[in-house]
Image (spheres, rainbow, N blue to C red):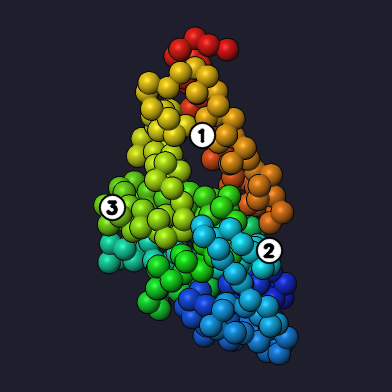
Amino acid sequence: MAYAKWIGGAVGWALGGPIGGVMGYWLGKMFSDDSLALDAGTGATNGHTGRGGRGGRSHARPTRAGDFALSMVVLSAAVMQADERVLKSELDYVKQFFRTNFGQATAEQLSLALREALKNPVDVRGVCMQIRANMPHAKRLLLLQYLYGIAQADGNVDPREVDLIRRMASALGISDKDRASIEAPFHSDKPDPYTVLEIGRDASDADIKKAYRRLALKFHPDKVRDMGEAYAKQAEARFLEVQEAYESLKKRRGFK
């Protein structure tokens, strides 16, 4: 089956735990190979266990493209249901995102997964803690950026969606500064460059340069390129936001 071929080669730790619980029925239809037997208590397969230290920095196995995709699907469902209704504009945004970044065939698979996730209650904190324990920080930032895009899909960011995403960010181990920096462009076409660069207005020129170098490294597309060009493309959009904020302050203050 085409689904099993894609998912089977791309998913690791996301098969178990709270994510596997939400997607369990759908995943069960996709798999028949005993080598993919689940340990639902640990979110591990083949006898391996995922370990997450403080801040989720310890990873027994790498985050594969499918782990990220299933995390994206499950949290998408939670955000879409936050205002107690699933809007066509949100579905269209998610499906278009899938098509643009993964191609038509994979987009169809992910859309079916999303339909399954929307049928089931999502343990948001449990899912986020599973992601935090297994997914590197750079990829969690990318996931948060995507979720804000869903909230903005209908042109009106609902406070309930923003509140949920902020709670997700906390459970994902993302700092308030990082969260505010990612959130800012979704509230305005011209976000405050100081917020994007995670600095105060009293920052010196040297502080601005230092903040830019730090964030340019943090959000560089190469951080997620191991999962494929589709993810690197999404990261590049965030990298450009940081770059534009820096260029705006350079022009405003007149330094080089």
Q: Quadrant of the N terminus?
A: bottom right
Badge 1 marks a residue whose secondary structure is: helix
Disc 1 target residue = 241
Q: Is residue 240 above or below residue 154?
A: above
Q: CA distance from mark 2 to mark 1?
A: 27 Å
Q: Is residue 233 above or below residue 60?
A: above
Q: Residue at x 68, y 56 (%)?
A: 227
Q: Earlier in the sequence, mark 2 or mark 1?
A: 2
Q: Residue at x 43, y 48 (%)?
A: 175
User: Is residue 156 visible in this depiction of the protein?
Assistant: yes
Viewed as shown, does residue 184 lie left or right of 129?
A: left
Badge 3 marks a residue whose secondary structure is: loop
Amino acid marked by disc 2? Pro
Disc 3 target residue = 158
Crowding at dot 2, Cα within 10 Å, few <14 / some 14-19 / many 20+, comes out as: some
Figure quadrant of residue 3? bottom right
Q: Position of residue 102 (x, y in %)?
A: 63, 58
Asked whether 141 or 151 is in front, the reply is 141
Amino acid marked by disc 3? Asp
Dot in front, 2 or 1: 2
Q: Position of residue 169 (x, y in %)?
A: 42, 54
User: Is residue 99 visible in this depiction of the protein?
Assistant: no
Q: CA distance from mark 3 to mark 2?
A: 34 Å
Asked whether 14 or 136 is in front, the reply is 136
Viewed as shown, does residue 230 lie left or right of 153?
A: right
Crowding at dot 1, Cα within 10 Å, few <14 / some 14-19 / many 20+, comes out as: many
Disc 2 target residue = 62
Q: Residue at x 65, y 87 (%)?
A: 37
